[in-house]
Amino acid sequence: MSTTPSTLQQVADAAGVSVSTASRALAGKAREYRISSRTEEAVQQAAQKLKFRPSRTAQALRSQKTGLLGVVVPDVANPFFAAIAREVTRAAEENGYAVLLADTGEQTATEQRAVEQFLSRQVEGLVVCPVGQESRHLQRAEAAGIPLVHVDRGFPDGSAVTVTSEHTRGAAQLTRLLIDAGHRHIGIVQGEPGTLPNEERIEGVRAELKRAGIDWNPRQVEGTHFSDESGYQAAGTLLRAGQLTALFAFSNQIALGCLRAIREAGRTVPRDLSLVTFDDHPFAEYVATPLTVASQNVTEIGRTAARLLIDQLASGKKPRKRVHRIPVQIHQRGSIASIES
Amino acid sequence: MSTTPSTLQQVADAAGVSVSTASRALAGKAREYRISSRTEEAVQQAAQKLKFRPSRTAQALRSQKTGLLGVVVPDVANPFFAAIAREVTRAAEENGYAVLLADTGEQTATEQRAVEQFLSRQVEGLVVCPVGQESRHLQRAEAAGIPLVHVDRGFPDGSAVTVTSEHTRGAAQLTRLLIDAGHRHIGIVQGEPGTLPNEERIEGVRAELKRAGIDWNPRQVEGTHFSDESGYQAAGTLLRAGQLTALFAFSNQIALGCLRAIREAGRTVPRDLSLVTFDDHPFAEYVATPLTVASQNVTEIGRTAARLLIDQLASGKKPRKRVHRIPVQIHQRGSIASIES
DNA sequence: CAACCTAGGACAAACGATTGTGCAAGATGG
DNA sequence: CCATCTTGCACAATCGTTTGTCCTAGGTTG
């Protein structure tokens, strides 16, 4: 039974009034427009009986407000982005917005299409976790006057609001833990070079090593993407290069790849090798050796992004602070072994 | 610079033609409507120059096709639902649809609001992972003529298409593994009673126990939700009740709770207790004792759901098969210990 | 040379809401 | 008793497209 949804016209007819009256009666503007309560009720009754459900499409066209927010992530199945999507979605819901989701599959081209599609659908705001370093399409969104919040990765040049973690600090802290345990030879299993989180984490590590008077060797860094596959390859390379006492995985997914590589190399954490990682994970606690991590506060990141966006929508003004950094939390769980220095 | 997007009217003016001509020229209907190629190009040029981006809102209103699909899940941060969301989103993208996402936070009331909101936005199809046993709002969607696909949980009464796993079979196989290893006292840490996956898994366990001539004891089943908290509580209760040699966790999240309870009880898997679980997880392999699991093929479930929905949209016909069951795969990883019978 | 094509576009009516304004009929005031 | 309010609603424009139909000017045909 493909029942056509009833329109305001039909409701008006059923109640014996004009569409304008029906509209105002249902919008609660009866008093304001001097609609008698008898008429008002008649309209409401008619609406009930006909199961009237206003077309948001028509409303959007008329009011030029779609009530839509766009969320663009590289991979919703990644717990980090899933959390972002969840928080934004929930916040949106609470504020009467609906969320359009796009999964770019880590592809810039797809991301561009998605943004374009969203603009065409007149989203009122965008939360984007950009995949690459290309940001032209995002600047076009800003040019179109659409509030935009970047999450995780920001662009140095861009003017967009960005929410991300205290990468430098977190990385420095983890590095400190390793150094304090006597480690001098630390392999870095990085994510995508050139991205903000990656560079800042590198920066944190370097700074901390420097403080401890340990030389920095570019060859102790491997990896190309924030993926387990990249982590696996990179960890393998580092392990084969020899003489490392610790590995620093730059993400969740990367840590997974590291664990596999470590196992295949016949090593054990932390006996033969210490391991620390960015991002926490529910299971990190139950891994053979529970992992010591720098946990990004994804919930807070997502909420902050949503709040910044919705505030911007409500006020029409950009927030003062352009880059928001959420603290990370260190969980020491025992994947670092103390060694003789 | 809040540039108002340019309209077809402006493009038409710039090209010196009427809106109708502009519309047809851009829609590639020049030949069909005898528009000279000179005019056609003029329109395209004008569109380029003005960065014309058609309003999908207006198109939707006029054509009564929004090109929107709705995806409703209890929690996108749950890897299972995240995978569903991802597959549907990707399939939608490939077919020119955009996806509205709702996260119900496991609340029926929120789910109802979400569905209502989506109907109001005239989604052309819905993929829902229902949270409870209430399905009235979903029936209303069907009554509205919106193709609907249920994922994971179906309703015995409903007429909606459902995609889910071979719960009974998977549960039976895991149970078999335990029985073969000599286990006679198996605790079931269930999810939400009354839901299809839960009941079918229970059914699988019971059938297999019966085949082996092992008595069924309702008191060996605990748990109220598919959450780690419920899993933690339930596992605790079961362990305190004593004399169990194995635990069967009905989900990922539940397994997490079980691991915590087991650790707190000072027991070790599999030495003191065997553990099997439904749902795989990237980390399951690296847990102290890698977990033996029945892995749901989430990717396949998501794809099937998307395909069923999109086929339905394209053909206008419901698929013949109402319930689609995707096989589960058993991964034996060593969390089952053999014991003397 | 009148009747008829054909090409090339313009006009206008939708789609389903919102909203500024106009217009009657009864109430009120002087 | 006439002018003026108020009350209570209807009319119609508008948002930006799509699409069926109509119109005009030049070319063809008999």
Image: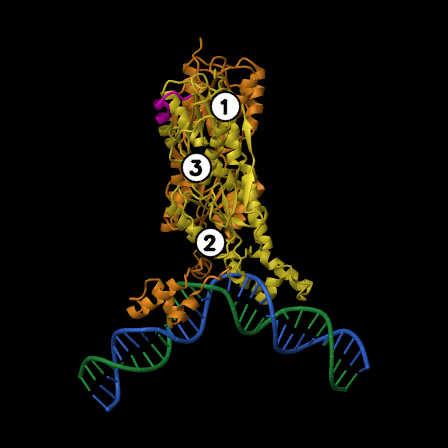
Chain colours: A yellow, B orange, C blue, D green
Q: Residue B304, located in which quarter of the rendered image?
A: top left
| Relative depth, front residue between C7 and B170 | C7
Q: Amino acid at mark 1?
A: Ile
Residue A284 drawn at (x, y percent): 49, 26
The answer to whether the residue labelled 2 contacts the one labelled 1, judged by CB atoms less than 8 Å apart, is no
Label 3 neighbour load within 10 Å: few <14, some 14-19, many 20+: many
User: Which residue is label 1 attached to?
Assistant: A179
**Which image quadrant: the C terminus of chain B?**
top left
- Position of B124 relative to C21 (above/below): above
User: Which residue is label 2 attached to?
Assistant: A141
User: Which residue is label 3 attached to?
Assistant: B83
- Is label 3 or label 2 in front? 2
Please check the rendered image and state whether residue B335 is part of the magenta-colored stretch, yes or no.
no
| Relative depth, front residue between A173 and B18 | A173
- Find the distance from the CA under tag 3 to the CA under tag 2: 28 Å
Residue B31 falls left or right of residue B123? left
Q: Earlier in the sequence, mark 2 or mark 1?
A: 2
Report the residue at 55% width, 40% height from top: A325
The answer for which chain carries disc 3 is B
Q: Amino acid at mark 2?
A: Ala
